[in-house]
Amino acid sequence: MMYLDAIALVRTLPCLAEPGKIIVIGKPNRSLAEVLPYLATLPGILAYNPEAHTLTFRRPMGFMTLYADRVYITQIKSADEGLELLAALQEAINATWEHRAELIAVTVGRRAPRPFDVWTLLPQTNCKLCGEATCLAFAVGLLQHKRSVLECPPLQADGSLTDRRATLEAMF
């Protein structure tokens, strides 16, 4: 049984984060509240708030935020691309719903990592070997996907930091 019949494109807005691109706003034909806990089990989740019924995914470029009654997708090239993404999202929601018996619904909130959260996993040596002035600056670069965990030489070389490196690799 399908969960959703459609997600209609209801509006586009200019994307402030990426000039020349748009934000697509879609409206599902029924509330997403019931399926969001299952969608929260998928990879790429940045934040989930079960009380507010919001879920944010990272896309290769931009973000997708699902609310019970609407969907926002950022950094889209055109309304046509937005329609394609809304159709793909509808399929993903239906597939997740169809397999919900195999999933454990997420019932607790999850927030996106902040620079300090990432910094605590770094060596905190401020060695500048990565090209940044501080480990905190490198943490910000990781969060912005402008840097890679592999670019931190101490993290790669120090065997005692293996767990931290694995955690960071899983985050990014």
Image (cartoon, rainbow, N blue to C red):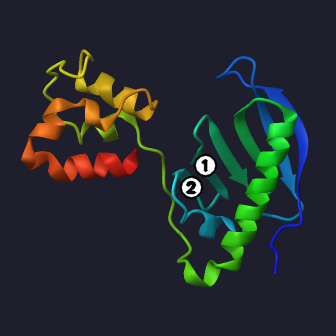
Q: Label 1, secondary structure: give it.
A: strand
Residue 108 position, x and y percent, is: 50, 65
Which residue lies at the image location 66% right of the left edge and 21% below the top edge? 18
Q: Is residue 25 above or below residue 139?
A: below
Which residue lies at the image location 62% right of the left edge and 61% below the top edge? 51
Q: Amino acid at mark 1?
A: Thr
* Nearer the camera: disc 1 or disc 2: 1
Q: Amino acid at mark 2?
A: Tyr
Residue 34 visible here: no
Question: Which residue position holds label 2?
Answer: 48
Q: Is residue 3 above or below residue 13?
A: below
Mark linked to residue 14: none
Residue 74 position, x and y percent, is: 70, 35
Q: Upstream in the sequence, badge 1 or badge 2?
A: 2
Where is the N terminus found, in terms of image quarters?
Answer: bottom right
In the displayed image of the protein, which residue is found farthest to the bottom?
101
Residue 98 position, x and y percent, is: 71, 78
Count of numbered tags: 2
